[in-house]
């Protein structure tokens, strides 16, 4: 199988090829004002390379969901899932090498940025065994890596920009090849754009965008005028995967299109003004309502969908009587154990887990969550270590030994302490990573080093490479085990 695909023809009618293997190593930046043919170019690139490489598309407008019909991409409508489910799907995508389209069109801008950040970060943090090559196409990249926060919170911008920077700066070693497309180069963070070595520059009119495009293409400023004169569907291409000198490319035909199709001129109706006036200002009270057609009962809704609905809207049925304080603790323990059991390999945020906690408590008869967010964070960390019952006196010494640690390190420390108290083997890096909310083995090693500096643990590795961790505050140590 050749590693090159055709994206169109040059000014002499010769095919312009893109070396996909080189593209995976050097990344691509596409720029063009609205109407320049940017989305058409991305679609051509995706269609031609679909049989050769896994593809992940971040699609803010739902333009690329039709790839599913012809090429088997899995469409994920982000509005239908919570953060925890998005994380689980992103992990499985890398593991099973599935080509997907993450459609964000049902979300507001800030939610789009946070969802894309969570999704991309999970792809980036995948275990080394899952670092298969994949094209990660991000349309409207200026939304996810903006120069300034604009109308969104600083937190959303920070998370999204960090994920995009990781994709473009460090993604190559993890098999992720960023292909980012933007309408406005001036609005795209420079450290993200600068990591691309291949460029396809379409028509643009603003001087600041033309100047940046000319700089990236190695053209003099006076030559930048030709970017303004490009026809729709024509791009200037440059880079090791495309051409060593700027080349004018007319993008070829595609097999799929957007769901709405192209916007064409449609003449207005020929109805006379009097008739239209009568239609618009008719007395609607006299209109007869159509008789609704009988319909079959809807199919049963999945349990996950029902839980999401309960989280967003109050229940229509009468609330169960509130349990008194003495009865709350068994409910809290049961709910915490359920959440830990359902967590699997996912690492959702604490706020997402707290929302899930509130839903489950309401389903068990508690009108309001019996724990606030800080208390939940502590109790959930204990539950992850098998200490769901906070009133059990056995855990008092372990909690006292954890006092020097930041609260985000409580869960992995308690996991170690629990193993030491039970004489069990030392938890491996994967278990500690899940408790810490990461997929990175490097972060786990730094975590243990930090705990050692604080004096709360002592790590030992024997000659066979097995690790044990002692907890001075308990005077106990885990059994030796592979790290």
Image (cartoon, grey):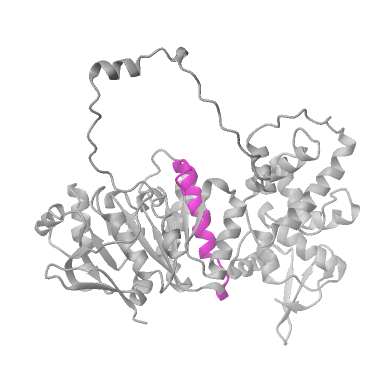
State the residue in front, 205 or 416.
205
Q: Nearer the viewer, residue 73 or 280?
A: 280
Give residue 156's position: percent from left, percent from top: 48, 46
Q: Is residue 403 visible?
A: no
Q: Write down the region rendered in magenta.
A: 104-129
Q: Quadrant of residue 89?
A: bottom right
Compared to residue 329, the image places residue 45 above or below, namely below
Which quadrant: the N terminus? Answer: bottom left
Q: Main secondary structure of the magenta part?
A: helix
- Whole-percent x and y of residue 54? 45, 69
At 28% across and 67% down in the image, what residue appears?
A: 198
Q: Residue at x 87, y 44 (%)?
A: 330
Question: Which residue reaches farthest left?
Answer: 222
306 part of magenta stretch: no
Asked whether, in this view, residue 241 is left or right of residue 69, the answer is left
Residue 456 seen in the current view:
yes
- Front residue of 439 and 12: 12
Q: Is residue 110 above or below residue 241?
A: above
């Amino acid at each position: 199988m050749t590693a090159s695909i055709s994206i169109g023809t040059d000014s002499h009618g010769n095919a312009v090829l893109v070396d996909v293997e080189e593209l995976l190593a050097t990344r691509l930046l596409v720029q063009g004002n609205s109407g320049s043919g940017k989305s058409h170019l991305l679609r051509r690139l995706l269609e031609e390379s679909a049989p050769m490489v896994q593809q992940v598309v971040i699609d803010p407008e739902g333009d690329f969901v039709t790839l599913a019909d012809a090429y088997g991409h899995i469409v994920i409508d982000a509005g239908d899932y919570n953060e925890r489910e998005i994380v689980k799907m992103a992990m499985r995508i890398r593991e099973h090498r599935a080509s997907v389209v993450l459609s964000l069109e049902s979300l507001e801008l800030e939610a789009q940025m946070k969802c894309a950040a969570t999704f991309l970060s999970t792809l980036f943090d995948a275990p080394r065994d899952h670092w298969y090559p994949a094209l990660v196409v991000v349309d409207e990249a200026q939304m996810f890596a903006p120069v300034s926060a604009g109308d969104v919170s600083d937190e959303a911008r920070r998370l999204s920009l960090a994920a995009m920077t990781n994709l473009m700066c460090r993604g190559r070693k993890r098999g992720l090849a960023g292909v980012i497309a933007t309408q406005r180069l001036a609005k795209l963070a420079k450290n993200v754009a600068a990591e691309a070595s291949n460029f396809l520059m379409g028509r643009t009119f603003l001087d600041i965008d033309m100047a940046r495009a000319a700089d990236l293409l190695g053209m003099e400023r006076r030559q930048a005028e030709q970017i303004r004169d490009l026809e729709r569907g024509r791009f200037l291409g440059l880079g090791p995967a495309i051409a060593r000198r700027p080349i004018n490319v007319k993008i070829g035909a595609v097999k799929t299109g957007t769901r709405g199709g192209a916007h064409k001129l449609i003449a207005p109706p020929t109805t006379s003004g009097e008739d239209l006036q009568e239609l618009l200002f008719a007395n609607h009270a006299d209109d007869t309502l159509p008789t609704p057609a009988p319909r079959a009962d809807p199919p049963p809704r999945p349990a996950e969908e029902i839980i999401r609905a309960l989280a967003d809207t109050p229940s229509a049925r009468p609330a169960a009587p509130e349990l008194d304080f003495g009865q709350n603790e068994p409910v809290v323990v049961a709910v915490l154990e359920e959440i830990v059991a359902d967590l699997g390999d996912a690492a959702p945020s604490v706020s997402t887990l707290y929302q899930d906690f509130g839903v489950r408590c309401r389903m068990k008869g508690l009108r309001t969550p019996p724990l606030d967010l800080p208390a939940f964070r502590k109790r959930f960390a204990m539950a992850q270590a098998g200490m769901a019952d906070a009133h059990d006196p056995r855990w008092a010494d372990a909690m006292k030994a954890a006092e020097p640690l930041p609260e985000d390190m409580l869960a992995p420390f308690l996991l170690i302490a629990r193993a030491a108290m039970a004489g069990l083997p030392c938890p491996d890096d994967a278990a500690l990573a899940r408790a810490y909310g990461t997929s990175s083995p490097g972060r786990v090693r730094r975590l243990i080093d930090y705990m050692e500096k604080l004096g709360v643990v002592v790590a030992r590795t024997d000659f066979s490479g097995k690790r044990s961790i002692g907890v001075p505050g308990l005077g106990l140590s885990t059994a030796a085990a592979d790290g």
